[in-house]
Every structure is written in structure tokens, then in C-alpha cells.
Image (cartoon, rainbow, N blue to C red):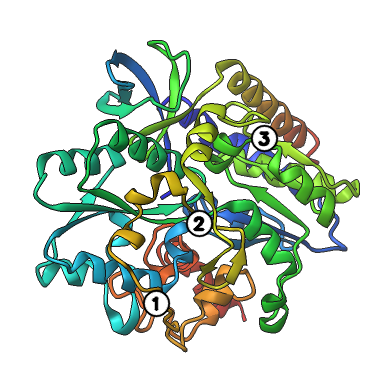
Amino acid sequence: MCLAIPAEVTKLLPDDMAIVSIDGVSKEISVALIEDLAIGDYVIIHVGYALTKIDPEEAQRTLELLHELSAEALGAMP
Amino acid sequence: MKYADEFRDKEIALGLANAIQSEADPQRPYRFMEFCGGHTHAISRYGLEDMLPKNVRMIHGPGCPVCVLPAGRIDMAIRLAERPEIIFCVYGDLMRVPGSQGASLLKAKAKGADIRMVYSTIDALRIAEENPQRQIVFFAIGFETTTPPTAVMIRLAEKKQLANFSVFCNHVLTPPAMQNILESPDIRNIGRVEIDGFVGPAHVSTIIGTAPYEFFAEEFGKPVVISGFEPLDMMQAILMLVRQVNENRHEVENQYSRAVKRDGNLRAKEEVSDIFELRDQFEWRGLGQVPYSGLKLKRAFAKYDAEARFDMKELRVADNPACECGAILRGVKKPVDCKLFGTVCTPETPIGSCMVSSEGACAAHWTYGRFRDHQQRRAS
């Protein structure tokens, strides 16, 4: 039920619909819950709806922090 | 897949496991409940429990909407689906959930009921438009993630003036259930589990934001870390919880900042508040009656409420007495503590709901965790 996946918006359609690409597979979904959507945005889709946009800067920040935490721990190993 | 693969890096996971190992105090237990079934599934699928020190334990919570739906509501759905004038639209993972006496929507479909699996509420609307001579009922279940799609569907039905469309509403809310786990009198009778912190749901939080957990963290003095569903997200969230426990803090922290904001998705929340209002109480499997934890349609949209339209009677059904789903959903017992687990109850022949959904604790353990039981038996 709650498993949702990131997908790239490739085409905006009328009536709050859009085409997204999930690893190259296209799917038509509703974007009724999202404001200011543009082609190239990544969204999290669930039961045929985009729930939220993914913030690329925050994603980058999280990845950098993960690398940092991991490197620190591995560096501290005897 | 972008935004997924980079959060599955094995080397970084090992580094995070080391960080948890070195920061967790070996003299004390750390018991963290992951509320959400998506997290339960990820923990099992990626073998995260094997990467944690022995004193850091994950307790599976009740956050699987299929698992917490009481058998009585399934029976009500089956009765509705069997009516000849109705086309009953459901999400696929509801088909095999057991009602009373082994009944299920799948068996009802086999006997001739017109039950159709849909991926999205938009499919259900399309079926209603294509079949004006039939009554279309959508079986709406789920937490805050699936409620906005139901709300959008009702708004569209209103716009298109579809008179043959209604919703059997079973939407529930996350925060009241988390609260119930910590304070319900029922729980005290059945046994309770000590919890040192919560991994907060990922996609529920994209909608409701992080703010609703703040009262909870303050009131109960428990740390909450909202986490994404990828393995690195979860390992980082566990590390953040360990640090909060060590520093005696109980705050709401957001590990999943790429998708979750403090106020969540305002547009989705507006859609929901336009259409739904709180029920005084709603029955959860494993938790009993939880006050203000379920939603119903507002009076202005009552014509779309299947319970009123078809004069549905509330049914209460006792779970199979041998099934431990209730205690497992609350983290009091593990799947292997249930004598049905892996004997008569498997994903092919589920007796309890936790074995039906891939997010259920029993199904996750059956699919990914049984080798660990074998290793433990050999070691003892």
C-alpha cells in the first residue's frame, strides 16, 4: 500500500494529469495534488498520484551527509 | 533509478552500521518502533536487522493499512460486492485479506461478484463513467497517503455529476494510532512493549508534514525520526534515534527532507479537509476502538457514502483466536511467536492479515527473515 517510487515528469497533460518515466517505463498519473510542476521534476508516486516533489538540493545534502557519516565511522575503525 | 539507487550503496550502509555500533551504549537496550509497513518491508528486504548491534531492536508497528482493517469491515465489503447491481473497485492488496470463516473478496469474485482491481481512484471513476446503468463502489482504505486520492476522486465525481458512484470509506490516521500504542487501556490488558523511539512514516509525512508528531514527542517524551524507505535512509534514521536516546532528547527530526516538509502538502491537506471529517472512533485490528482515528465523508458529500446509500450494517467479527496478528501489530509478539506462522498461515494461505500484505510483519518475515530463525536454532 505505502510503497511509492520516484519518477521523472516527462509530459504535462490537461485535467491535472501527467506522463512520468520510471526507469524508462512511461505511466500516466494524476498531479492534482501538486502545485507548480515542470517537466524534469521528480515526484513520488503512489496509487497513481504524485504525492510530493523531490527537492534535488535536499537529496544532495542527505547524500553528502550519508557519505560523511559513513566515512567517519569507517575511518574511526581500528 | 534516480533517487533510489544512490540510497542503496552497500559501502555506505556498512559505514553507517559501524557508526551505530560504536555509538550505541552496550549497557542498555534501544527499542525502536517503525510504525510504517513500508519500513517493515525495507528492514526485512535489505536485511538491516543483521547490520544492527544485538541491543538495537526494531519493533514492527501497526502501519500497514491492509493489516489493521478489522475482519468485520472485510465482511461488510464482501456483502456489498455480492450485490448484483454493484461493481466493486478495490486496490489489489485487499483481495486476499481474510474476513470471517475464510471469506475473502477473491473468493467472492470467484463466485461471480463483479469485483475489479484498480491501480488508482481514477480507474474507478472511469469504470463509473463507462457503466452508467451499474452502481460503482470504491473500497477506500489507507492512511494519510491514500486519503487525498480518494478526496480528489469524490471532487471529480461531484464535478462530473456521477450519480452511480460511492465510496466505502475506511481511511485512518497515523498520529492517533501511535498515541494509542503508548496509552490505550486495552493495550495494558493485553501487554505492552517498551519503546524508546519511533521511525516516522515516509509517505504519510509527505502529506501531513512533521508538525503533527511534535505534540507526540513532547507529550510522551519519545524521539521521532521521519525516515525515507531506502536502506541508507533507515540506517541514518536509526543512528539519529540512537543519538537522541544517548543525549536524552525527544525531538522530531526529519531524515527524509528531500520529500517531507514541516507543513507537508498543503494542497493535499485542503482536499482532505474539504471532503472528510473525523469519526468519533474506528476499530483497528489489534488496537480495538481508537478514538478520532478514522475519517468519514462530510454531510455535504453524504450522497457518495456507500454505508448510507446501501444501508450497510456495521459487522463485528472476532479474529481467528489462534492468530496473533493483534499482538504482532502492536509489537508485543513476533511472527514466530504465533503457532499458525509458517504452518497453516503462509502468504499462499493467509489466516491473518499480517501475512497478506507484503508490508505485514509476518509476510516480511516469511519472505526474508526465516533463515535467521534457522541460524538461531543451530546456534542454541
Residue B53 picture location, percent across and down? 72, 57
Residue B148 picture location, percent across and down? 45, 39
Tell me, yes or no, whether the two marked residues, 3 and 2, touch with CB atoms within 8 Å. Answer: no
Q: Which residue is mark 1?
A: B315
Left or right of residue A5, residue B164 in this image = left
- How many residues crowd mark 3 within 10 Å: few (<14), some (14–19), many (20+)? many
**Residue drawn 64% across the image and 74% down it:** B332
Give the amino acid type for the residue marked by disc 3 in the picture. Answer: Gln
- How many residues crowd mark 1 within 10 Å: few (<14), some (14–19), many (20+)? few
- Cα separation between marks 3 and 2: 20 Å
Residue B274 vertical placement versus B61 (above, below)? above
Residue depth check, mark 1 versus mark 2: number of the one nearer the observer = 1
Q: Quadrant of residue A24?
A: top left
Residue B144 vertical placement versus B263 (above, below)? below
Mark 3 vs mark 2: which is more N-terminal?
2
Q: Quadrant of residue B363?
A: bottom left
Q: Which residue is mark 3?
A: B255
Q: Which residue is mark 2?
A: B44
For the residue labelled by badge 3, is the local secondary structure a helix, a strand or a loop? loop
Mark 1 vs mark 2: which is more N-terminal?
2
Residue B299 picture location, percent across and down? 45, 49
